[in-house]
Image (cartoon, grey):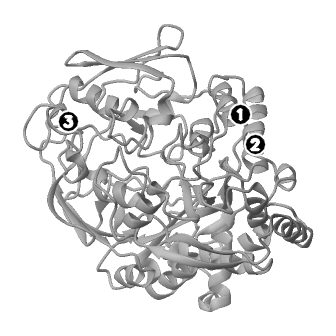
Amino acid sequence: MSLDGTRRGSAGRATPRQPKSCIAHEEEETMPCEDNGTYKSLVISFATVLRRSRPRATSQLGLQSVLAAVLACGVTAATAEAPKPGGVLTYMIPADGGPSLDGHRETTYAVVHATAPFYSVLIRVNPDNPSSTTDFRCDLCTEMPNPTDNGLTYTFKIRKGVKFHDGSPLTAQDVAASWNKIVHPTPGVASARENNFVMVDTITAPDDETVVFKLKFATLTFLPALADPYGYIYSKKILDRDMHWYEKNIMGSGPFKLVELQIGQSIKGERNPDYYHASQPYLDGFVAIFAPKQSVRTDAIRADRAALEFRSLPPSARDQLVKELGDKITVQESDWNCGNVVTPNHQKKPFDDVRVRKALFLAIDQWKGAQALSKIAIIKTVGSIVFPGSPLAATKEELQQMIGYWPDIEKSRAEARRLLKEAGQENLAFEILNRNVDQPYKIVGTWLVDEWSKIGLKATQKVLPTGPWLESMRSGDFTVALEANCQNVVNPIADVGRWLPHEVQRENYGYFSDPEMIDIYNRMLKETDTTKARMLMRQFDTRINQQAHQLAVTYWYRVVPMRSYVKGWKISPSHYLNQDLANIWLDK
């Protein structure tokens, strides 16, 4: 632990290196680049680069050349500017609302983008270094603890004087109650991340300033899992009265206080004058507008009715905004710990037949698909269950041995047709449940329907708003679904817990049973040697693939164009992180 309370470093976990840093020099046409890693964080006005380039750079070809040059190395044009207090940030949320307001229950960005500004968490990733997998900072605690008892006990001291927005004091009792709701939910209470904390034995508050987590076994996955942006701290008094209250209500201790919520339309917050981080938040308030259509969101940014959306826009929208608005637009980009997943419902015939499921996956040309889709969608990389680039991820050679990733697509589709004929399902017609979000759900869904048609399958899309889409999966009312596996801090062993059978992972909607998967995962969770952990991860990945339980299709790529007056926010490999808005200020 460093003197500033930061915990750094641990083996066996993916550690993405920091963003590359480049600056466009006024006298030079080249862009010197200090290569600090694989992540690209572009925090530069592309139009500034265009203006400093030769006149022909303003042509479409020139624009593409400059964009390519910038994207090739990544850019961080950082200046030590003093934050300016005041102003109201307006931003877009690319959804029509979430199923509920409870961060413990939900997994969608539609919830965290709308509600994170109202809540505190115990620990978080450093908001000035959100791409890190090891740089954790206290939010409600006073310092990051060193584990004791051979890694089995973590003791957190809680800040004094923190108040909920209703004026009541926040103590360690509230922290323990909130985390027990997440880790040990009572019957009838849904917790989306319960499975991330199977290592936790007890969570107690021996006094109002101390919270103690006792683990069943030491594991490297615990601390990054604890830095969960959905780990909102709720009032114990309210939870004791009604565990479901937070599904329809908001009351936290975060940087902003709720002003108004119009379900599916907008949410407004105002500065919390009692916030415990000195001088923050800088904004007077914010307005978040729900808008599932990309054209609506892009038009709002173009007309300056909104400054940005935090999730992502496709490269085409980025290029158009840069071309039209010049240096009024700044762009940040990053690889993304997020990707789509094809999930057959094993309880619905004929998808209880592994041959049919394999045929679905063998029909898909991921390699050409990712290349083509990357031009129109927020998609870039082919990968399996582990974030590409992680030490635990499958290599390209390993991927190409797996169902759904064969390099010879004609051979793959021939095998798919053979399996369908053997199963008596050559003319299978089915419906794929999809989310009413353009990027990239509807685009990927349309692509999949076309891929399946190439082996004679007749698929149609059923597109629903976010809430009904999730409820259909939770109730099992679908045959095949297009969903997504998106995580926050890159923490591969915890992240792949999402793929475990429904009996132990409520957010897995394949509705299958697989004791072998569970056994492999439990052994991997306790492993602290990276080499051994990778061997177990390959076994786990292979088991999912051989049984065709689910298929990862294309990892996403974050592209966040924003009005250049927005300062203080940094992109990360997760659209869940860094969303409480406390660091943001407006330079206008």
Q: Position of residue 331 (x, y in %)?
A: 50, 69
Q: Nearer the viewer, residue 88 or 295?
A: 295
Query: Which disc, if any, is residue 77?
Result: none
Pointer 3 with pointer 2, Cβ within 8 A: no
How crowded is the residue under tag 3: few (<14 C-alpha within 10 Å), some, or many (20+)? some
**In the rendered image, which residue does mark 2 sit on?**
543
Mark 3 to mark 1: distance in Å? 37 Å
Query: Which disc, if any, is residue 516?
Result: 1
Image quarter for residue 59?
bottom right
Nearer the observer: mark 3 or 1; the answer is 1
Mark 2 to mark 1: distance in Å? 8 Å
Mark 3 to mark 2: distance in Å? 40 Å
- Per the image, label 3 sits on a secondary structure element best described as helix
Q: Looking at numbered disc 2 in the image, what kind of residue is underneath it?
A: Arg
Pointer 2 with pointer 1, Cβ within 8 A: yes
Question: Which is nearer the N-term, disc 3 or disc 2?
Answer: 3
Query: Which disc, if any, is residue 239?
Result: 3
Q: Which quadrant, please, contains the C terminus?
A: bottom left
- Per the image, label 1 sits on a secondary structure element best described as helix
Q: Position of residue 41 (x, y in %)?
A: 55, 58
Q: Nearer the viewer, residue 489 or 477?
A: 477
Q: Looking at numbered disc 1 in the image, what kind of residue is underneath it?
A: Glu
Q: Nearer the viewer, residue 311 or 349?
A: 349
